[in-house]
Image (cartoon, rainbow, N blue to C red):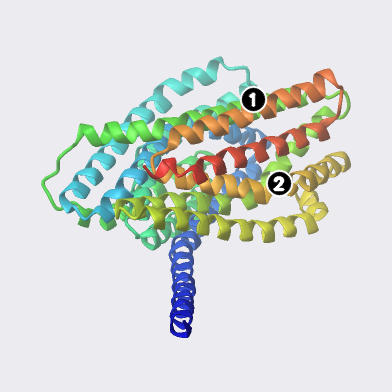
Amino acid sequence: MLKRFINDNLDLADQVINNRHKLRSYIAASWAICWPMMLIMFFEFLITIIDVYVAGTITKDIQAAYGFVLQLYFILTVIAIIINVGTVSIISRTFTGGDKARLSQAVVSAMLTGLVSGLACAFVGFFIFPLVITHVSVPDVVKHYAVPLIRFYSLGIIFAFPLINSNGILRSTKQVRNSLKTMAIVCTLNIALNFYLVFKTPLGFRGIAASTAISLMVGAFLNFTYIKRFIVTPIHYSAAFVKQIAAIGWPIGFLQIAWQTGTAVIYLILSHVPENNVEILAALTNGMRIESAIFLPIFAFNMSNAALIGNALGANNKTEAFRIGLVTAGLGFCMCIVLTLAVIANAPFLAGLVSHNEIVIRESVRYLYISMICEPIMAIGVILSGALNGAGDTKSVMIRVVASFWLIRIPLSCLFIFVLGLGAVSVWWAMNISLIAHATFIAQRYFSKKWLH
C-alpha cells in the first residue's frame, strides 16, 4: 500500500516536471519566432511613418496624394496577402514533413506564383490605376501627384510580392532571423534613400515611391539567397500546390477587403453624428493610429502562430499544435495588457502628439479609454486566428470575423446613431462588443479542435 502510494506520487511528480519542461519549451519556441516578427512589423511601421513625414515636409498636397496612393497600393497587395497565407500554411507543414523534394517543389511554385502575380498587379498599377485616378472625385492637385507616385509604387510591386512571399517561407522554415536581417536592411535603405532621392535628386517627391521600389528589390534578392538552398530538384512548377495556396489564402483576402470596407462604412456612419462630426472622424483616425502601436506586435504573434502551428501539424503532432497555439496566445495576451496599460496611462499625451485641436484630443482620449478595455480580448482572437490560418482553416476565420464586423459592429452602430440618436461613444462601445464576439467565435472554433483534422 505504502509502496503504491509512493509510486503514484512519484509518477505525479514526474508528470508535473515534464509538463513544466514542455511549457518552457513551448514558450521558448513561441518567443523565438515572435520577437523577430515584432521587430519586422516595427520596421514596416517605421517605413510608413517616415514616408508620411517626408511627404509632409514637402507640401500637404503631396501628403494627401501619398495617403490616397497608399490605399490603392493596399488593393494591389491583397493578392500578395492571399498567396502569403497559403504559402505559410503549406510550406510550414511540408518543411517538418521531411520530404525535401516536395518542399523544393512547394518553394518554387510559391515563388513563381508570387513573381507572376506581382508582374500582373504591377501592370494594373502602372497602366490602369492612373486612368482610375483621373476619374475619381479627388482634388486635381492630388491627382497630379498621385499618378507618378502610383507608377513608381507599381514598379516596386514586382519585388514586393516575392519579398512578402519569401518572408513567409523563411518564417515557415524556422529562419525568421534571416527575414529580420533582410527587413532591417530594407528599412534602413528605404529611409536613407527617402531623404536622398527626395531632397538631393531631380526625382523630388517621386523619390518617396522610388526608395520603396529600390529597397524592396534589394530585400527580394537577399531573401532569395536564403531560400535557394531548399531548391534541391530541377525547377518544377506544380499547379496542385498553387491551387492549395489559393484555396487557403482567398478567404483571408476577402476578409481584408471586408474589414477595410467595413471601416469605411463606420466613417460614413460617424459623419452623421449631429455635433463635431469632423472632429470625431479625426479622433477615430488618430485613435486607430495610436492603437496600431498595440495591434502591430499582436499581429506579429498572429503570423508567428501560423508558422508554429503549421510546423507542428507537419510533424503530425496535433497535441503540440493545440498547446503551442495557446501558449503563443498567452504570451501575446500578457504583452497586450502591458501595452494597453501604457496607452491608458499616457492617452492625453499621445492624443496631443497627433493633434492640437482640443475637441479632437478630447474625443481621441475617450476613444482610447473605451477601446483599450477590450484590447487584450482582441489579442486573443487575433492570435488564435493565426493558429487557424496556419492549419489552413481560413474559411472559418473569414466567416467569424466578417460576421462579428458586418452583423454586429455595423448594425449596432446604425442602431445607436440613426435610431437611438446616441453619440460617437456608442460606436466605440459597438466596436468593443464586436471584438468580444470576434474573440468568442474564434476561441469556440479553436477549442472545438476541428481545425486539427
| Residue 64 in picture, x, y percent from top left | 64, 33
Q: Name the one closer to the observer, 444 or 191.
A: 444
Q: Is residue 346 above or below residue 76?
A: below
Q: Is residue 121 left or right of residue 138?
A: left
| Residue 372 in picture, x, y percent from top left | 73, 49
Q: Is residue 232 above or below residue 237?
A: below
Q: Is residue 40 left or right of residue 236?
A: right
Q: Is residue 274 above or below residue 282?
A: above
Q: Name the one closer to the observer, 407 or 322.
A: 322
Number of other residues with Cα within 10 Å of mark 1, as a class: few under 14, some 14 to 19, many 20 or more: few
Q: Which residue occupies 66% across, 39% down?
A: 435
Q: Amino acid at mark 2?
A: Cys
Number of other residues with Cα within 10 Å of mark 2, as a class: few under 14, some 14 to 19, many 20 or more: some
Q: What label does residue 407 carry, if any?
A: 1
In the picture of the structure, the residue carrying the numbered disc 2 is: 374
| Residue 249 in picture, x, y percent from top left | 39, 35
Q: Amino acid at mark 1?
A: Leu
Residue extending furthest toward the left:
234
Q: Which residue occupies 80% across, 48% down?
A: 369
Q: Which residue occupies 63% across, 21% down?
A: 138
Q: Secondary structure at mark 1?
A: helix
Q: Is residue 49 above or below residue 2?
A: above
Q: Which residue occupies 40% across, 41% down?
A: 85
Count of numbered circles in the view = 2
Q: Secondary structure at mark 2?
A: helix
Q: Name the one closer to the observer, 47 or 241.
A: 241
Q: Earlier in the sequence, mark 1 or mark 2?
A: 2
Q: Is residue 293 left or right of residue 234?
A: right
Decide if residue 72 is in sight here. Answer: no
Cα distance, mark 1 to mark 2?
A: 19 Å
| Residue 90 in picture, x, y percent from top left | 31, 44
Name the image quarter holding the C terminus: top left
